[in-house]
Image (tube, grey):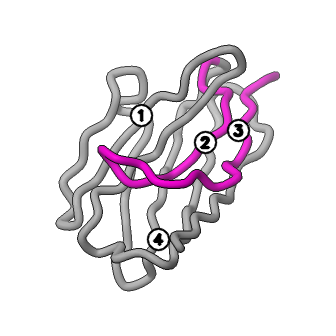
Amino acid sequence: QVQLVESGGGLVQPGGSLRLSCATSGSDFRINIMGWYRQAPGKQRELVARITPGGSTIHADSVKGRFTISRVNAKSTVYLQMNSLKPEDTAVYYCNAWPKPGSWGQGTQVTVSS
């Protein structure tokens, strides 16, 4: 069974930075396209960024130039470096496979507020 454990969230002021981590187990991580998703209160979950096994990335327009997704296949871990954070980035952040996500982990809360 696939397990996803997200970490690294917290409370940060606007303009600040956070680095999220997602440790995975129970799947063939090396062949999966992985994504970071987020869900803000009252909104649908959305894809923030995705990365292929070879390292090609796509970022949503709302985070382009501020967020960077990366992965270390040997560690079955995917990261999200978030810079220049804005209040509208406040959400619970999840990692999962793309385009067909499996069971979701608990996510990690990111709150951007002064």
Amino acid beneath label 4: Thr
What percent of the width, then of the height, locates residue 16? 65, 36
Amino acid beneath label 1: Leu
Q: Which residue is mark 1?
A: 47
**Callout 3 touching callout 4 (CB < 8 Å):** no
Amino acid beneath label 3: Val
Q: In the image, which disc is placed on residue 96?
A: none
What percent of the width, then of the height, locates residue 113? 78, 24
Q: Could you give the CA–CA distance between mark 1 and mark 3, rounded to whole angstroms?
A: 15 Å
**Callout 2 touching callout 1 (CB < 8 Å):** no
Q: Earlier in the sequence, mark 1 or mark 3?
A: 1
Q: Which residue is mark 4?
A: 77
Q: Could you give the CA–CA distance between mark 1 and mark 4, rounded to whole angstroms?
A: 18 Å
Q: Is residue 99 magenta?
A: yes
Q: Residue furthest front?
A: 1
Q: Give the camera-side residue of 52 and 100.
A: 100
Q: In the image, which disc is placed on residue 93?
A: 2
Residue at image point 61% right, 18% down:
88
Find residue 93 and report its image quarter: top right
**Callout 2 touching callout 3 (CB < 8 Å):** yes
Q: Residue furthest top?
A: 42
